[in-house]
Amino acid sequence: MIRVLICDDQDIVREGMRAILSTVPEIEVTGVASDGAEAVEMVEKRQPDVVLMDLNMPGVNGIQATRKIHEKYPNVHVLALTTYDADEWVFDAIRAGASGYLLKGTPRAGLIKAIEGTAAGQTYIDPSVAGKLFTHVAGTTVVHDTTVAQSLSPREHEILRLLANGQSNTDIAAQLFLSEGTVRNYVSAIFSKLGVTDRTQAAVIALRHGLVD
């Protein structure tokens, strides 16, 4: 059972999400909050697995609340909610500790998938805006993480760089003179070492930690 707390300053959004999630047997809505301060307070009382966090709210906004939750309750995953795919608040939320972000209005199946992935410790990124995140991260100062870098072999590092630059397994195989099966094995090993499950998540980690050009 995945316990979810919904935080949004709009009644219609809160109740709409509650109605959708109430139809999913594997998900329990433990409560709703109308601002960041209330969300932080409710996390302690309700102990959710995932918080669906609106960002631009009056008073304590979603970024401030995300930072507090991440610091005080590191096992609680925050999934940031945003209205626009170019919302700069998203990047601040990720820096504050959000596990990913989701566009409001995402269809039911996408919402459930995002919650399940976030609860499992994955970094969920709405596919429609992943490219904007790559561009943003690539254009900002990155933190070089030697621990992450040292976990990868030179070949894995090279394949991760190509993967993060948008190349397919076929492209990588042709460029490195490897078979596609070998590349797939390398990619699986990279995912395992980075603790991710797809190429988007791997690319974000690579960009964030300065592992690619």
Image (spheres, helix red, strand yellow):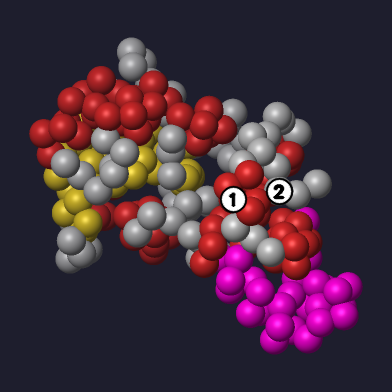
Percent of width and height locating residue 164? 72, 56
Residue drawn 68% across the image and 45% down it: 207
Per the image, the residue denoted by label 1 is: 148
**Image height of 139 relative to 3, above or below:** above
Q: Nearer the viewer, mark 1 or mark 2?
A: 1
Q: Position of residue 178 (x, y in %)?
A: 81, 82
Q: Which residues are magenta?
A: 165-191
Q: Quadrant of residue 88?
A: top right
**Please, what secondary structure does the residue beneath circle 1 have?**
helix
**Image spot of residue 15 (x, y percent):** 23, 41
- Which residue is found at the position 43% from the left and 35% from the top? 97
Give me the residue at 43% from left, 56% from top: 122
Q: List the residue tagged with mark 2.
A: 211
Q: Contact, CB < 8 Å: mark 1 with mark 2?
A: yes
Who comes first in sequence, dot 1 or dot 2? 1
Amino acid on which disc 1 is placed: Val
